[in-house]
């Protein structure tokens, strides 16, 4: 029983250390989504995801103009430990990619919420309601 309490305490401490901004939406696959003033969306990986991956060494971004299907693979983030697919947060079309990541992928580790990977237009703004808010995302992390 003491071991279980210690594990729970460690998990709770870790969850409070992870940065999960309240102004963003999240996917179960650890992407964040930010609504821009122009009505388009930026997306990147969460602090939790970059922490799990470790030092990021390569980002394969989707092609500009590519169609996104929510939940489908649209890119890849590779670290010294492993690679992880990027899954489209919503249905839509890629409008821009962060070209800086080709030469400086470590920016994701340094500032995961200031380093977007791609910008997209969603097919329907209502789809944003299908994403998690900060509390729901934190709850998901605790459950896993």
Image (tube, rainbow, N blue to C red):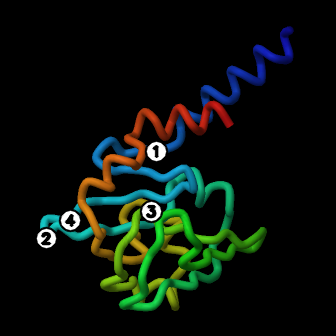
Query: In this picture, is 48 found above or below 39?
Result: above
Figure disc tally:
4
- Quarter the N terminus occupies: top right
Which label lies toward us, 2 or 1?
2
Q: Is residue 138 above or below residue 28?
A: above
Left or right: 143, with 27 as reference point: right
User: Reading the chain from its start, which is encountered first: label 2 or label 1?
Assistant: 1
Mark 2: few/some/many CA within 10 Å (<14, 14-19, 20+): few
Residue 41 is left or right of residue 37, and the answer is: right
Q: Which residue is mark 1?
A: 19
Give the mark toward the camera: 3 or 4.
3
Residue named by callout 2: 38
Q: Secondary structure at mark 3?
A: loop
Q: Residues within 10 Å of mark 4 (few under 14, many from 20)?
A: few
**Position above or below: 84 against 50:** below
Task: Identify the residue position indicated by label 3 in the image.
Answer: 89
Q: Which x, y percent locates residue 35?
A: 24, 60
Does residue 41 sit above or below 134 in this rendering?
A: below
| Separation (CA) of disc 1 from disc 4 | 20 Å
Mark 3 and mark 1: Cα distance apart in space:
20 Å
Quadrant of residue 105 within the rendered picture: bottom right
Mark 3 vs mark 2: which is more N-terminal? 2
The alpha-carbon separation of the residues under discs 3 and 2 comes to 18 Å
The mark lying in front, picked from 3 and 2, is 3
Q: Identify the mark at residue 113; answer none if there is no mark.
A: none
Front residue of this view, candidates 29 and 104: 29
133 or 100: nearer the viewer: 133
Is the C-beta separation of discs 4 and 2 under 8 Å?
Answer: yes
Say which mark, if any, is on residue 36. 4
Earlier sequence position, callout 1 versus callout 4: 1
Of callouts 3 and 4, the N-terminal one: 4
Secondary structure under tag 1 reads loop
């Amino acid at each position: 029983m003491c071991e279980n309490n210690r594990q729970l305490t460690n998990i709770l401490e870790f969850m409070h250390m992870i940065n999960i901004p309240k102004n963003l939406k999240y996917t179960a696959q650890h992407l964040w989504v930010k609504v821009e003033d122009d009505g388009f969306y930026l997306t990147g990986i969460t602090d939790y995801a970059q922490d799990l991956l470790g030092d990021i060494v390569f980002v394969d971004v989707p092609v500009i103009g590519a169609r996104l299907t929510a939940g489908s693979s649209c890119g890849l983030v590779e670290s010294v430990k492993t690679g992880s697919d990027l899954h489209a947060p919503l249905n839509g079309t890629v409008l821009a990619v962060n070209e800086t990541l080709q030469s400086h992928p470590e920016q994701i580790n340094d500032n995961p919420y200031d380093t977007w990977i791609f910008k997209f237009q969603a097919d329907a703004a209502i789809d944003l309601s299908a994403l998690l808010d900060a509390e729901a995302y934190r709850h998901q992390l605790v459950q896993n």
